[in-house]
Image (cartoon, helix red, strand yellow):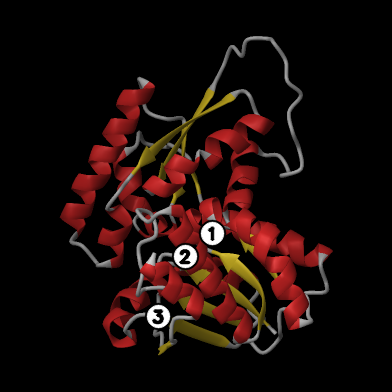
Amino acid sequence: MAIGVFDSGVGGLTIHRALVDRFPRADFTFLGDQANVPYGGRPGEEIVALTRAGCETLFESGCNLVVLACNTAAAIALRRLQQTWLPGYRQALGRPVNVLGIIVPTIEAATGLPWEHEAERRGDKVEQLDVLGVFSTPATTASRVYEIEIDKRRQDIAVFSEPCPNLARMVEAGAPRAELEAVVEAHVRALAKRIGRPPDRAVLGCTHYEIIADVFRSFLPPGTPLIHQPGATADAMERYFARHPEYPIGDRGARRFLTTGQPGAVNSLAEAFWGGPLHFEPVKPTAAADQAIRI
């Protein structure tokens, strides 16, 4: 059995890299749905169907656990799949399988509290607010998942999200650094204008953005802490596996890289993100993916 890592494109390799470093002997299969990237501007039903299709592909390839290394998929599709699709699919497979996301670990890192914790509501006015900026795709921003879930746990953290409509597509396409800098600078300025000042901390709420974290740092005030999703996810998965031995993670150190797109066209870009040679295998879209594309 293996750990599956799913993303709409190659941005999820940032999560994959952290997991491989944390669990070097585990077996991993990565799937990038590059035929349909990016997800951030798609309708919710398409995101759910495409995410389900990716999970099916990974389960059918031998994974027993899938990590959604995509904020948009985790924000829009994860709960729906866990509640309405996964129970029946698990029963049909006849073995334990599960789907997890990267938003829960990120919120735990941002709040310093476990996911199960909910703050006691008080009427006292909070004197000092910690302002957290979240840069994300339009779909993640529209879900308000960070605002809602952080407010449940910490009323002294004010969350402001900035949608970045084309940034994931630009990173995926390997846009020139000057173009990326212009777009990031505009979004950092827009967020600061809405807040009235720069954020105290920031979350790069799309795994593609982690690839250009240095660009964000260059336009945020010096020393602004960034909450890194790869490290937060690896920490959470280590705790999860300690609690759930029913999900074996393998011990051969096997690595597979799958794509719904054209393998040859993405290798050089993906290798730059990964930091070493990669070989992607093509996979055919499942029926669920075909249905999503036709919606």
In this view of the protein, can residue 92 be seen by the observer? yes
Q: Say whether marks 2 and 3 touch (CB < 8 Å).
A: no
Residue 107 image-quadrant placement? top right
**Mark 2 to mark 3: distance in Å?**
19 Å
Amino acid at pointer 3: Thr
State which tag comes first along the sequence, 2 or 3.
2
Assess disc 2: are there few (<14), some (14-19) or many (≥20) residues with their C-alpha within 10 Å of its C-alpha: many
Number of disc labels: 3
Q: Quick one: quadrant of the C terminus? A: bottom left
At a point 17% along the width and 53% down the height, the residue shown is 179
| Residue 43 sits above or below residue 203 on the image | below
**Residue 10, horizontal then vertical, whole percent:** 40, 70
| Residue 196 sits above or below residue 46 on the image | above
Amino acid at pointer 2: Thr
At a point 41% along the width and 85% down the height, the residue shown is 278
Amino acid at pointer 1: Pro
Secondary structure, mark 1, is helix
Residue 139 relative to residue 189: left or right: right
Instruction: Check disc 3 and report the residue beneath it.
Output: 260
State which tag comes first along the sequence, 1 or 2.
2
Instruction: Check disc 2 and report the residue beneath it.
Output: 14
Residue 40 image-quadrant placement? bottom left
